[in-house]
Structures are given as C-alpha cells and as structure tokens.
Image (cartoon, rainbow, N blue to C red):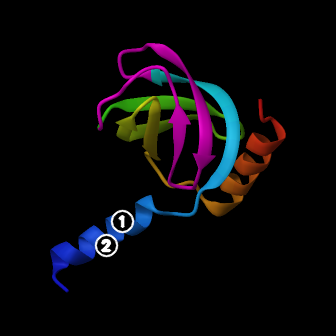
C-alpha cells in the first residue's frame, strides 16, 4: 500500500470512530462572532454531529460550549440538510470524554 493510501485509511479511521448517541442542546460561536443554537445528536472523542438551522461550508470553525470541557474549538467537516459533522481541534482524552458523555446523557434536553 502506498504512503498516500495509508494516509487515506488513517483519515477514514479517525472519522469513523465509534459515536455515542446523545441529545444535547447548546450554543456555538462562529469565527465571525455569531452565536448559534445547535443540537448535538452524537459525539466521539474526535468530534460530533449536530442539527442546526444554519448551513456551513466545510472548513468553517466553531467554538462550542460543552459541559466538563467548557469552550472547545471544532472544524466543520461536512454540512448536509440541517446537519453538520465537526471534528474537535484536539482529540478529547478518555477520562474527560467519559465525564463529558455522562453529563451529556444526564442533561439531555
């Protein structure tokens, strides 16, 4: 397998990390400073999928408010029909991720 193919496989694996289903409404801030409402429907240590009324271009940056972690940077990877998939700026370590998941489930709104 070529180096390029190995990189493609590694990127694919990162995006397909197991997701945990949640239902959590929060706010995010765009790079332009606009505050928007989003509804997170699944999350992993690498990112999340959310529903929002705003459309985004891939590559757009957001800062999202999450329990346990506070404000977290994320990049929109895809946007389709009122849903966005975002990758966190930095992968969340296991212990804080488990705390986050417990809070998201407990505070489902």
Local secondary structure at mark 2: helix
Question: Within 10 Å of the Cα at label 2, are there few (<14), some (14-19), or many (20+) other Cα atoms?
Answer: few
Q: Residue furthest top?
A: 34
Residue 44 highlighted magenta (yes or no) = yes
Number of marks drawn: 2
Vertical arrangement, residue 66 with respect to residue 26, above or below: below
The quarter of the image holding the C terminus is top right
- The location of residue 78, given as percent across then percent down, is 35, 41
- The location of residue 10, given as percent across then percent down, is 34, 71
Instruction: Report the side of 31 relative to 25 (left or right).
Output: left
Give the magenta-colored segment's residue range: 30-58
The quadrant holding residue 85 is top left
CA–CA distance between discs 2 and 1?
A: 5 Å
The quarter of the image holding the N terminus is bottom left
Q: Are marks 2 and 1 in contact (CB under 8 Å)?
A: yes
Residue sitting at x 46%, y 29%: 82
Residue sitting at x 57%, y 55%: 45
Residue sitting at x 51%, y 63%: 17
Vertical arrangement, residue 71 with respect to residue 5, above or below: above
Give the label on residue 9, or none: 2
Q: Residue furthest right?
A: 106
Vertical arrangement, residue 45 with respect to residue 85, above or below: below
- The location of residue 49, given as percent across then percent down, is 52, 42
Local secondary structure at mark 1: helix
81 or 104, which is in the foreground?
Answer: 81
Residue sitting at x 69%, y 34%: 24
Residue with the mark numbered 1: 12
Question: Within 10 Å of the Cα at label 1, are there few (<14), some (14-19), or many (20+) other Cα atoms?
Answer: few
């Amino acid at each position: 397998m070529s180096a390029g193919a190995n990189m493609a496989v590694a990127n694919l694996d990162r995006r397909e990390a197991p997701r945990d289903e949640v239902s959590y409404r929060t706010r995010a801030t765009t790079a332009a400073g606009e505050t928007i409402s989003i509804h997170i429907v699944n999350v992993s240590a690498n990112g999340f999928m959310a529903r929002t009324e705003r459309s985004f271009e891939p590559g757009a940056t957001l800062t999202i408010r999450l329990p346990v972690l506070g404000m977290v940077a994320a990049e929109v990877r895809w946007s389709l029909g009122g849903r966005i998939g975002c990758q966190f700026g930095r992968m969340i370590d296991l212990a804080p991720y488990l705390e986050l998941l417990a809070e998201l489930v407990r505070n489902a709104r």
